[in-house]
Image (cartoon, rainbow, N blue to C red):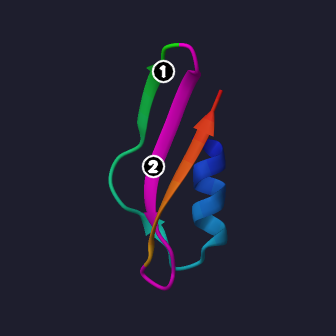
Amino acid sequence: MYDFIRYRDKMDSGDFYGDLVETDIPGAGHLTFVYARDPDGNIIELQHWG
């Protein structure tokens, strides 16, 4: 979660778009992702595998 908050802070006027989701993918690992809106209004997906 810390990385997502740090990224949001770097985006200036960007913000999260939806909820933070965590799930285990069999054979691949643990996935955390969230959608965010950048300052230009584009929706992007941020992922962290761990």
| Residue 29 forms part of the magenta stretch | yes
Residue at left 47%, top 19%?
Answer: 24
What secondary structure is marked by label 1?
strand
Location of mark 1 (residue)? 25
Instruction: Decide: few, some or many residues near mark 1? Use Cα within 10 Å; few <14, some 14-19, many ≥20.
Output: few
Label 2 crowd bin: few (<14), some (14–19), many (20+), radius 10 Å: some
Within the image, what quadrant is residue 27 found in? top right
Image quadrant where one finds the N terminus: top right
Residue sitting at 66 percent across and 47 percent down? Answer: 3
Which numbered disc flags the more N-terminal residue, 1 or 2? 1
Specify the segment rendered in magenta: 27-41
Up/down of 25 relative to 46, above or below: above
Q: Residue lying furthest front in this view?
A: 27
Tell me which amino acid carries mark 2.
Answer: Val
Instruction: Determine which residue is flagged by label 2.
Output: 34
Alpha carbon distance from label 1 to label 2: 16 Å
x then y, percent, for residue 25:
48, 21
**Residue 35 location in percent, x, y?**
43, 56
Residue 3 highlighted magenta (yes or no): no
Name the residue: 58% across, 20% down: 29
* Side (left or right) of 26 relative to 3: left
Residue 14 placement (x, y as % from top left): 50, 74
